Image (cartoon, grey):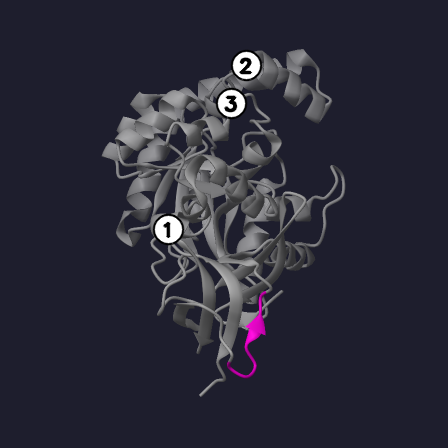
């Protein structure tokens, strides 16, 4: 029998309340939750800090940023994965959905390599038990990409695949619906002339008209037997939300308009908003502000998008609008539920002892300690 870990003198954020009390961890699970202080030998004083559930991040592109820390510098994949894991754990993220893109539209060369190497690295490293966070695969399917079926088919049945999203990053669509802005952005990124970018845009839109719907149906049919959570990406209209819901797509990642976010709420579709959008005070792409969606009662989940450290700060920022338990649930209980992970995300006896100790200083939350299944990892 393992020795109990007792955490006392903590402000414990429960699903529907906040108490000052004590937690007992045993055999990787939460064994007891109680109000008041423990005087048991070995009880650890949390000094009045918050204890929240371990963060569940259902969408992070952070691995891509470790693989390519500068525009012309590609980092060894496995080393990048180790750095990514450490950053997630230090941010209080105990469950990570590594969002890997499948499909190249001609502007993000190297993403397919990151996907292939990421799957291999995660498969190997998951088996070692050395990673601080638990990593799962979120496969982001770029529907207008020619190479999508050939990339997805070999990994669709991989045991670590825990979420699928369908997306369309075509110019003039969704996140990139401002076409002049898109062309200027791609010209800066590639050093191409505006005319050359426009030629690529014309090619992509013609191809989209031919293959997007075929690929969408193929992806949904290919993964249907696994009963995975499926998300759409960058929804902009109520019609898109309704169509997706009819096809069993019950998560909307980063809706780009208030119309889409409100429609998702009306259809019982979970809306994911980006933590950087909240911390920065708005979308870097000129889309709807996440805090405005929260004020409308339509924000269910916060994901790191591309900054794991933003998760906890974003949740506490949202607490002024939603109340603290509900705001913490956007990074814990709600993503766990949407991802069909019923053993985590809440502080409750019998669930995984995935926990984060948070101290507040000058208005910012600082992660002090992190436990995954009762073992301290930070």
Residue 23 at what x, y percent from top left? 46, 69
Q: Is residue 165 above or below residue 95?
A: above
The local crowd at label 3, few if under 14, some if 14 to 19, many if 20 or more residues have their Cα within 10 Å, is many
Q: CA distance from mark 3 to mark 2?
A: 14 Å
Q: Magenta includes 342?
A: no
- Of badges 2 and 1, the one in the foreground is 1
Q: Which residues are magenta?
A: 40-46
Give the prevailing secondary structure in the magenta stretch: loop
Residue 147 in view: no
Sequence-first tag of 3 and 2: 2
Mark 2 in CB contact with mark 1 (< 8 angstroms)? no
Give the label on residue 356, or none: none
- Determine the secondary structure under disc 1: loop
In the picture, the quarter occupied by the N terminus is bottom left
**Where on the picture, by quarter, is residue 349?**
bottom left
Residue labelled with disc 2: 179
Q: Magenta includes 42?
A: yes
Residue 299 at what x, y percent from top left? 41, 35
Residue labelled with disc 3: 287
Residue labelled with disc 1: 339
In the picture, the quarter occupied by the C terminus is bottom right
- Determine the secondary structure under disc 3: loop
């Amino acid at each position: 029998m393992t020795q109990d870990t007792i955490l006392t003198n903590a402000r414990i954020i429960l699903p529907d309340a906040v108490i000052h009390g004590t937690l007992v961890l045993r055999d990787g699970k939460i064994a007891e939750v109680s109000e008041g202080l423990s005087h048991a030998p070995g009880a650890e004083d949390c000094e009045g800090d918050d204890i929240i559930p371990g963060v569940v991040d259902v969408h992070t592109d952070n691995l891509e940023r470790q693989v390519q820390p500068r525009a012309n510098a590609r980092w060894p994949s496995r080393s990048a994965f180790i750095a990514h894991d450490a950053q997630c754990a230090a941010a209080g993220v105990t469950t990570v959905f590594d969002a890997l893109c499948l499909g190249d539209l001609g502007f993000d060369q190297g993403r397919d390599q990151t996907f292939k190497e990421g799957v291999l690295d995660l498969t190997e490293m998951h088996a070692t038990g050395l990673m601080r966070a638990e990593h799962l695969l979120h496969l982001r399917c770029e529907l207008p990409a020619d190479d999508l079926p050939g990339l997805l088919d070999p990994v669709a049945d991989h045991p670590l695949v825990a979420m699928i999203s369908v997306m369309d990053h075509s110019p003039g669509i969704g996140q990139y619906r401002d076409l002049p802005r898109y062309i200027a952005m791609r010209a800066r990124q590639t050093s191409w002339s505006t005319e050359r970018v426009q030629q690529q845009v014309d090619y992509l839109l013609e191809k989209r008209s031919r293959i997007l719907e075929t690929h969408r149906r193929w992806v949904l049919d290919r993964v249907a037997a696994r009963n995975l959570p499926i998300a759409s990406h960058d929804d902009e209209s109520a019609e898109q939300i309704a169509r997706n819901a009819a096809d069993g797509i019950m998560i909307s990642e980063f809706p780009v308009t208030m119309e889409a976010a409100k429609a998702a709420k009306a259809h019982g579709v979970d809306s994911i908003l980006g933590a950087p959008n909240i911390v920065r005070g708005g979308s870097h792409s000129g889309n709807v502000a996440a805090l405005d969606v929260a004020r409308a009662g339509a924000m269910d989940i916060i994901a790191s998008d591309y900054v794991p450290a933003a998760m906890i700060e974003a949740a506490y920022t949202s607490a002024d609008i939603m109340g603290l338990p509900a705001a913490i649930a956007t990074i814990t209980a709600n993503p766990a539920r949407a991802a069909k992970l019923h053993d985590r995300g809440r502080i409750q006896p019998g669930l995984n002892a995935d926990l984060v100790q948070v101290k507040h200083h000058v208005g910012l939350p600082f992660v002090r300690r992190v436990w995954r299944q009762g073992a301290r990892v930070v």
